[in-house]
Image: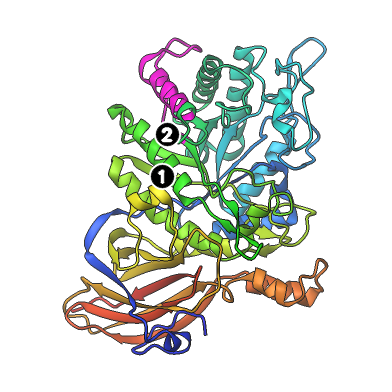
Amino acid sequence: MTRLILSLALVGSAVAAIAQSPTVIHVDLSQSQGAYKPITNWYGYDELNYTTTANGRKLLGELHDTSALPVYIRAHHLLTSGDGKPALKWSSTGVYSVDAGGKPVYDFRVIDRTFDAWLAAGVRPMVELGFMPEALASGTNPYYLAYPHTIEGSVQSPPKDYAAWGELCRTLVEHLVSRYGHDKVAQWYFEVWNEPNIPYWHGTEAEYLKLYDYAVSGVRTALPEARVGGPASTSPRASEAAAFLDVFLKHVANDKSAANGKAVPLDFISFHIKGSPKLIKDADGSSHVRMGLDKELTDADKGFAVVASYPQFQKLPIILSEADPEGCAACSAKENPANGYRNGPLYAAYTAATIKALFELQDRHKVNLLGMLTWSFEFEGREYFEGFRTLATNGVDKPVLNAFRMAGKMGGERVAVTSSAAEPLEAILQRGVSASEIDAFATRAEHSASVLLWNYRDDDLPTGAATPVKIVLSGLPADLAKVEVETFTVDATHSNSFTAWKAMGSPQQPTPAQQAKLVAAGQLEHGALTQSIAVTDGRVTLPSSLLPQATTLVMLRWKETQ
């Protein structure tokens, strides 16, 4: 029995592990660590045109439902020229062209369908201003080059005319305000370009700063209250990327806008963090995946340090506008076997560990982390569980989506947690998680508390027995007699459509009945609801167990004491 069982005695798989010394997790609800922000409520994808497919619309609705708080969506290719047909790492809207006399011609039909779908799903856009329309592109390469050469096309080049680029941004925002209303658009975020420190931008550093200036001037002309930011640069663990982020912040701090000679606006700072999984050869000649959690967290550590070096920016929101275990969502496990982690529960446990570490890094640097955006969505016309970095495959939710569902149920204040089997943050930054780490992250709201637990190691070795865990919660109201407990689990057999699919024989053309079972298996499994766990002097102990790669959410609720 693999589900986390919360009762007064260990049962099922926990009995087999009873001879072990349990991992002890202490949660002190009286010690606040600061506000819990829904940093996981952010998602993005390359292929903008998947937004309006049936599976895309379905997934958007599910992303909205991961949290009671706003969910934001970022996508590439909002301004790219083309016919609106997607391909790997490619989409288009055809929003901008010029007539025979060189005057701009705007066609908002694809953009309107896209934004309509986002708003119909109840999500909010994080509007990425890119890439360069063909009529404005200055590059000499072909405009579009198929994957894996998509970022080599002139779609990534600077504009021929920066004033025309700024006017494009102004006209876009003016249209959005007209269609959706001032108050609604003022809730969105506007980010200038994507990864301009690598070949996603074929211009110089100085040319990107100019691109930024003209873009935000155009946006703010149409909507003075618009929230604008950037630079969406890559992993700051690389010295060149950290330097690019620093140059951008220096520009905002010290320079005047190339567009209008005024101060350069900046409402949020964005950069990307990525891990680096690899294949490890085993003694028997086989191989397994080893994740790179240390790499992704080092990116955050270095990036936060750059931001913290500017006191005037230290309180600005930071959006990690791509935060992922590696850097290529469109590279399947067929193409890169190290990406096989994407289908199973390891991805969920990795995500849980990342959430806690990012909050710790935020606190260490005294910065303001707003979001960690997972660059994952869905791909059309691909095999089931082909191994893309996706949240769903052919309408079937993958285990990692249930980690985001768990995080979305948490709220209130972060509280102190210690675990006898936790890896210290500094050790993870230096060498990753080489042995199994059992740790937790907890929050407290009014009359409730939530504890997110995981059994994680970098090596994708899911075999092994469940580990006994003893959760000790203190700081409950002193006169409280009992709590209700609810659990949710992702592991090898729970909340896991991949396991269900393999048990069916891995069908690439499931029957309707099989599809329905897969869709059901992809949902977050509801564990047992325990009505009355006794509380003594504001303290409760919950015996439990965790399989390797398991992620579990324990939720406690109580009535107001008299």
Q: Is residue 506 magenta?
A: no
Which mark is on residue 119? none
Residue name at image x 70 percent, y 60 percent: 393
| Residue indicated by mark 1 | 370
Label total for image: 2
Question: Could you say which quadrant of the image residue 171 lies in?
Answer: top right
Mark 1 to mark 2: distance in Å?
9 Å
User: Is the residue under label 2 in contact with that under label 1 (CB below 8 Å)?
Assistant: yes
| Residue indicated by mark 2 | 268
Q: Judge from the rendering whether residue 398 lies leftward or rightward of residue 359; answer left or right.
A: right
Q: Does the image show residue 65?
A: no
Q: Could you tell me residue 389's position as x and y percent?
A: 64, 52
Q: Residue furthest front?
A: 283
Query: Which of 301/410 is in front?
Result: 301
Q: Could you tell me residue 496's position as x and y percent?
A: 61, 71
Residue name at image x 30 percent, y 58 percent: 414
Q: Residues within 10 Å of mark 1 (few under 14, many from 20)?
A: many
Vertical comparison of 293 with 545: above or below: above
Vertical comparison of 201 with 425: above or below: above
Q: Residues within 10 Å of mark 2 (few under 14, many from 20)?
A: many
What coloring was used for the rendering?
rainbow
Q: Judge from the rendering whether residue 414 lies leftward or rightward of residue 187; answer left or right.
A: left
Q: Could you tell me residue 442's position as x and y percent?
A: 34, 64
Magenta region: 241-270
Query: Which of 552/129 is in front?
Result: 552
- SS category of the residue bearing label 1: strand
Q: Does the image show residue 250?
A: yes
Identify residue type, mark 1. Leu
Q: Is residue 261 magenta?
A: yes
Q: Could you tell me residue 98's position as x and y percent?
A: 76, 17
N-terminal label among 1 and 2: 2
Identify residue type, mark 2. Phe
